[in-house]
Image (tube, coloured by chain):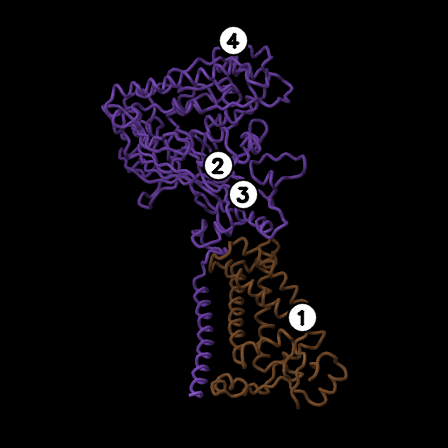
Chain colours: A purple, B brown
Amino acid sequence: MINHYPPAYRRRMYRFNYISLSFSILILTLGWVTTTLASSDSKIEIGISEYTKTDERHAIFKPKKESKATTDHTKLKELQGPFFSGPEVTKACLECHNTAGHQFMKNKHWTWDYKHPKTGQHLGKSVLINNFCTNARGNEGMCAQCHAGYNMDSPDFDFTNQENMDCLVCHESTGTYYKTPTSKGNKACSVMFEGKPAIDWAAVAKSVEMPTRNNCGKCHFYGGGGDNVKHGDLSSVLFDPPKEVDVHMSEAGEGFTCVTCHVGEGHEWAGSRYEMLVNDETGTGKPGMPRETASCESCHSASPHPITSVQGIKLNSHTQTVACETCHIPAIARGGVATEVDWDWRTMGKLKDGEGFKLKEYTQGDGHHRATYKSIKGTFTYAEDLEPMYAWFDGTMNYTTIATKFNPSKGPIDINSFSGSHDDPGSRIYPFKRMHTTQPYDKGNNTLPYMHLWGNDDSALWGNYDFGKAIEAGMKKNGIPYSGEWGFIETYSYWPINHMVAPKDDALSCSSCHSHDGRLDHLEGFYMPGRGKNEMLDLIGLLAVLGTLGGVLGHGALRMIATRRRKV
Amino acid sequence: MTTHKILVFKRFERLWHWSQMALIFTLLFSGFAVHGVYNLIEFGDAVTVHTWAALVLLALWAFAVFWLFTTGQWRHYIPTADNFITVARFYAFGIFKEEHHPYRKTYRRKHNPLQALTYLMVKIVIFPAIWISGIAYLLISFGQGEIFSWIGLGPIALAHTIAALAVLLFVIAHVYLLTTGHSFIDHVKPMITGYDDVELSNEELAYLKADEPGVLKEGD
């Protein structure tokens, strides 16, 4: 029974899909009847619903491998229920796992809080501003659906209460578990979360196991408000990727889950974008020595290429300057799911017959239509199979936080900037996805503001469509001074690319970079063969060769003329 | 003094010359591809070809240096002022008046003084520049070049490229000068058969006849 899903689950899954499909058809039909716009362009979708479709793709089930665990949770009497809420299940978990609560209390998935060890910056989802939906702070009602806790609806959440921890979101394996907003949004948003079947708490509690990609993916693949919106290298494709998209996670490849690489103990695991390890020279370590590192080198070593060829030896010395990801992830957003590369908030708030709507004018590789406009968010641009941006990176990110003042005339603001250079032996050339956004800022204080996006009131952006009110409310809620004046500013954010490693035959070729106008053409300040950067030398060389050729040709021509003259 | 056909270029010398030619053409072609002058060969393939050809050439040079010193053939490259001006004047003026080349090969000097000086410069300036910078480049780029890393790959590559340009200029001039004889073939032939016309004193002739069988061409 524990090896495979019980037939009852499977039936329920099919029924669930059938219900939601009918539900979508019903909504679409209603849309046709009630609006004239929809009939003229079927790509327009009335309403601001966000997640009804993606929910269906939150879990993909495969036959389970035989468990080697010494405890079969389905048989534990503590988990038979009945349970009526998440915290009740957590309480049952903690009765046996009596240190799990203390461990998880330090985890970022719970704290949403991070103090950067090098820059000293106070980071984490609870405080940061990004260039997608901008800020989770103050919008916990919506955003905390991806908080590994129960009922976080404001920054005043009780982080000391272990029973508020959500064990199930990471450990349940039925795929029937879901979370909904912890507070009410504007009436226009309520349609998003209706029509869901009730959670069978005992069933999900008994299904617990090590996190699968379904658990991690349901938040991490949908960051930024949709499939692959944020990262570019983390999308629903990874639920069941073909080998050419991800050689590690593909069933035809290694069949890894997320935690195969993101290893750790005591509810702390490796892999952080705030402080990254880009120069893992320890490599594989000694045999049997587990390394709590999510680096390529921790499995492949720092000299992974075969030394039986010149190119293999040469590639091994590249690991001193180039991250593995740079060559082995040839493009971002592969496998048919697009990523957002531009978000323009300036167009936010257009309505059709007084209602918010979505315009789905981008059809991505897998055939799904993606919204190019949403009334609540503005205009989006997508990209697939996108060439990454490459830069020297030492692993340390610096953030433009709520406290950072900037000079708006100095071009786009970097939401996160990073250091690194050729002269720093700890830096590597690294691939990034660069996100460009035009978003509101506090024009008087020259800072990024907190916006009040979510709420059933007259200032929440989502429903009222008024930046001024949303910023004023968002700042007031958090006790941060607001000048009262706002404008739009361009921003960039940089997303290190680590996932969707391609099979080795699809890695970049030498000439992808070692050529004129190659991928690293823009990187300055160091010698790299094949780029043709030394124009002075090339000019002198050309003149010398032409001069010599001219010399010998001239000498030869004079000889011919002299010979001919004598003959005449 | 009489002119005789003798074996000027021994078998090793001819093997050395022609394999060196093939390797230098290979290295010039692959090297300027690595430098980024053209895309006629993929960068990675160019690096592989260049590396192997360079290693083979280094081995060949090791044999050549050994050969030059053990056979005493290095003496042919000692610079000399004798006839230097005469030969230089010939290339600048006489050649246009169809004068005969003023230099006659002798048993002790198979190159004219201009030639000898050029080959000496190639041997002690251009080639060392290319192999010292090349070995440094190879070691650094294969992760073993700590002793050179203070210079940096950029300056080493620059020196290597400049030396490579000098080789290319030498090749152009060298090939052109082959046309200045009676014919191109006449100049190339000795390096293929080994035999060329050389002025011999009576003593030299007697010595070769007596002690160096096979050097004097049969029937000569």
Name the residue that disc number 1 marks. Answer: B65
Res. A122 image quadrant = top left
Name the residue that disc number 2 marks. Answer: A273
- Distance from Cα at disc 4 to Cα at disc 3: 53 Å
In the image, residue B104 sits, relative to residue A39, either above or below, namely: below
- What residue type is disc 4 on? Pro
Residue A82, numbered label: 4
Secondary structure beneath dot 4 equals: loop
Secondary structure beneath dot 1 equals: helix
- Distance from Cα at disc 2 to Cα at disc 3: 28 Å
Res. A383 image quadrant = top left
In the image, residue A165 sits, relative to residue B214, either above or below, namely: above
- Distance from Cα at disc 2 to Cα at disc 4: 40 Å
Q: Position of residue B145 (x, y in %)?
A: 60, 56
Q: Nearer the viewer, mark 1 or mark 4?
A: 1
Q: Give the crowd class for mark 3: few <14, some 14-19, many >=20 residues within 10 Å.
A: few
Name the residue that disc number 3 marks. Answer: A505
- Distance from Cα at disc 1 to Cα at disc 4: 91 Å
Residue placed furthest toward the top: A82
Residue B215, numbered label: none
For the residue pair B60 and A258, the one nearer the viewer reads as B60
| CB-based contact (under 8 Å), mark 2 and mark 3 | no
Callouts 3 and 1 in the same chain: no
Secondary structure beneath dot 3 equals: helix
Residue pictured at 43% horizontal, 62% vertical: A535
- What residue type is disc 2 on? Arg
| Chain name for mark 3 | A
Residue pictured at 49% horizontal, 87% vertical: B98
From this viewpoint, is residue A459 visible? yes
